[in-house]
Image (cartoon, rainbow, N blue to C red):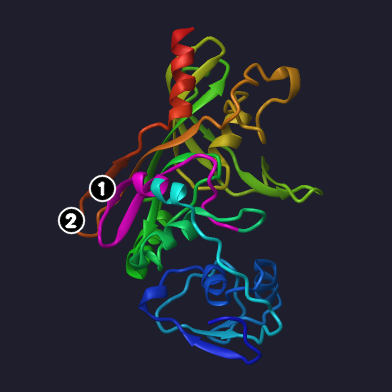
Amino acid sequence: MASTDKVQLVAITERHVGQRLDNFLIRELKGVPRSRIYRLIRRGEVRVNKKRCKPDTKLSLGDNIRIPPVSNVRETSSKIITPGLSELLTNSILLESDMMIVLNKPAGLSVHGGSGVRLGLIEAMRQIKDEWSDLELAHRLDRDTSGCLVIAKTGKFLKTIQSEFQKNAVGKTYLALVHGEWPQDLLAIDVPLKKNQLNSGERVVKVNTDGKSSKTLFKCLERFQGASLLEASPVTGRTHQIRVHCQYAGHPIIGDLKYGPKGPENMFKRISKLCLHAARIRFPDPVTHGTLEVEAPLDKYFQSVINEFHNN
């Protein structure tokens, strides 16, 4: 479906179960700017089962979506994946089944396109193979974070894994290299976080009593001169949670341009990339009903930084 000058009523089928409303509309209304789609949702012109809804509304089988006229929108050509990116993503697959792909996401690649991003990871993956055209993200990682990312092949698995995330039944373990000497007895940070938008439009997250409860477990694995290597396990899944919790502890992640020290306070200016890696993910296996655990090796840059600290 592209832009249209008539009201459309679309019934949700199995392939779209569990998908977010905004992602569904972005794919259905090709050529319509994201900003316009979000405006249509915000104004109540898009309805799910005749009710107003939010962009993150999860779609269920049989839902009826009312899509208003969106005429006079110029079709935009799809951004084409380069052979180099296709090879990088294909070689980054850690696990693939009929239901899912677990990928070692490269650092520096946004999971979604838009907001100045030419092509996001999920849009790129859909172009690699015809049978991957309906892939959906099961969760997200920050642009500069590398590591385990789960991608759903079916609507049924997407709904199942998202339910596991909501129940905190998915275990995630990160490696983080932080400034300073992390206290050995600092094993958990439990402070609420709230999203804020600056005048510049930049989104930042801050510790705020009005925010959502947020908890991360920490374990110091190694200490170096002026830095510490941590294992971080988020109990909740808030935006930028580990990064802000490390900042709150007084030990921001090295290479974090948003939450790290500025100017002369930054002892490691030479390290230009965020040293945060989603090393392991564990979740219930929908086939065996056991626990599925996948590990992602460190990317070359992060590993080279750790090697440099070892050598010093």
Above/below status of 138 relative to 254:
below
Membership of 56 in magenta stretch: no
Membership of 97 in magenta stretch: yes
Residue that sits furthest to the left in the current view: 288
Which residue type does callout 1 highlight? Answer: Leu
Name the residue located 57 percent from the left edge and 57 percent from the top edge.
113
Image quadrant in which you'd find residue 244: top right
Name the residue located 73 percent from the left edge and 25 percent from the top edge.
262
Callout 2: 10 Å neighbours few (<14), some, many (20+)?
Answer: few
Name the residue located 54 percent from the left edge and 45 percent from the top edge.
142
- What's the mark number on residue 292? 1
Q: What x and y, as percent, mark residue 239? A: 57, 47
Above/below status of 124 relative to 297:
below
Q: Are marks 1 and 2 in contact (CB under 8 Å)?
A: yes
- Magenta range: 88-113
- The residue tagged with tag 2: helix, strand or loop? loop
- What's the mark number on residue 47? none
Residue 240 in view in this figure: yes
Which residue type does callout 2 highlight? Answer: Thr
Above/below status of 272 relative to 312:
below
Q: Seen in the image, is 155 located left or right of residue 107?
A: left
Residue that sits furthest to the front in the current view: 83
